[in-house]
Image (spheres, rainbow, N blue to C red):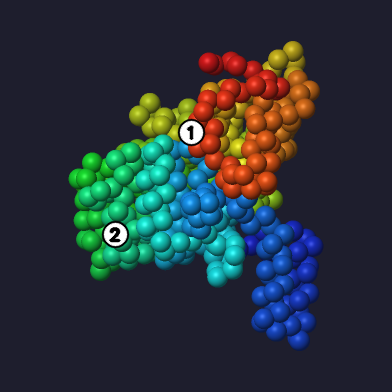
Amino acid sequence: MFKLSVPQPNMLDRNHLDYILAAMKRPETSRVEMRKISELVRTRMNPHPAGQKEENVPQLDGKPVSGLQHKYRETVLFFPSEGQYCHAYCTYCFRWAQFTSVGSEQVFKSSNRDVLLRYVQQHPMVSDVLVTGGDPMVMPASTLRHYLEPLFGPGSPPHLDTIRIGTKSLAWWPYRFVHDPDAADILRLFSEITASGKHLTIQAHFSHPREVEHPVTQEAIRLIRMTGAQIRSQAPLIKHVNDQPKTWASMWKLQSRLGVIPYYMFVERDTGARDFFSVPLTRALDIFSSAYSQLPGTARTVRGPSMSASPGKVCVLGETTINDRRYFVLKFLQSRNPEWSQKVFLAEFDPNASWFDDLKPAFGAKEFFFNEQYQQQKLNVDGGSSGQLCDVDWLAGKGVTSDSGQVDLSM
Ligand code: SF4
């Protein structure tokens, strides 16, 4: 828990650390200069991984919509301006740029609920809106209501089924739902959403069983479930924090007992202090498989280890050996083109690979099966013809044409 919340010197690579320390030691370094130096180092740490800025920002009326991301056909992400802060500032946060460059062009945020509503109305394939940040639960109940009411109140888009709220509040400020002055207003809002016929799911960020054990957390879970909302739990696998099977098994078991649905184990993204926190994929698979095998069927709702890479969420299903050669077995859980999710594909086994970009296609193929289509879409974006690399433009039913590195094992 200490390393989850307190930055460690070794999170910086040696050059960056020396650069920062040297600046700190110079008596003439002003706070302004120190800030500039820190910003410079931050810009070298891949602040917006997986093409978020270039590929996920959608358009409305021919213009980019700030504060929205639309990567997968069914789901739109909304970043309310007042929610771009957090109860916990996790050291491994993949959204750290939201907090470190507030006010700069790096931040995703919007206070325009009308644009969100119009965007959803104009995209009938969108069934889910994920309100995210930061942490939307830092907002007062009245602000949260302001953003959500158009999505579930009278006149709300009939094709919108689910409102998701991503939050770490259950782990770090469960009082939000129990003792805070507007706790009852929050729960009333949740009840109204579920009574409207929409599904409300709290995407709870729990990294460690310790975060689930607190009595106030358990009371908050009980109160939220009484509103008819579901709670799903997700977290990245982080070295020094939760890289043991027993940690995940005990967390998922406890969550199941409390009625929380284990949902995702993510692989640490290629951003920030990734070298300090990342776990090789083969180890991640071992941890996931070992923890999963200890669960009863009712808790085997969890998926992973999953990489939220640029083309989509790639799950490492397992390892296999063909003609004495080892391979990773992969599958998209979500992808920019929904058709990609129908395929199982292989990558060469690499004991040191810790992210999708480290992997090579199997059998000497030059590229993965989806790459040709993906690159073509990127060209369209770069050329300004689309502005968004979301699969909403792909619904005409293009087939997956390249079969390089692809093995259809399951379909
Ligand atoms: S809870 Fe999520 S958004 Fe907030 S600091 Fe942690 S990882 Fe980042």
Label 1's element?
strand
Residue shown at 65%/31% (left/top)? 373
Label 1 CA crowd tier, 10 Å (few <14, some 14–19, many 20+):
some
Identify which amino acid the numbered label 1 is placed on: Arg
- Residue 168 appears at what percent x and percent y? 42, 55
- Residue 388 appears at what percent x and percent y? 57, 45
Identify which amino acid the numbered label 2 is placed on: Arg
Q: CA distance from mark 2 to mark 1?
A: 31 Å
Q: Is mark 2 within 8 Å of ligand 1?
A: no
- Residue 338 appears at what percent x and percent y? 52, 30
Above or below residue 27? Residue 283 is above
Residue shown at 68%/46% (left/top)? 383
Above or below residue 42? Residue 379 is above
Name the residue at the bottom extreme.
28
Q: Nearer the viewer, residue 367 or 360?
A: 367
Label 2 CA crowd tier, 10 Å (few <14, some 14–19, many 20+):
some
Residue shown at 54%/16% (left/top)? 410
Residue shown at 23%/61% (left/top)? 185
Q: Is residue 263 left or right of residue 355?
A: left
Above or below residue 153? Residue 304 is above
Q: Nearer the viewer, residue 75 or 123?
A: 123
Name the N-terminal-most of marks 2 and 1: 2
Label of residue 234 in the image:
none
Q: Report the residue marked by disc 1.
A: 303
Q: Report the residue marked by disc 2.
A: 145
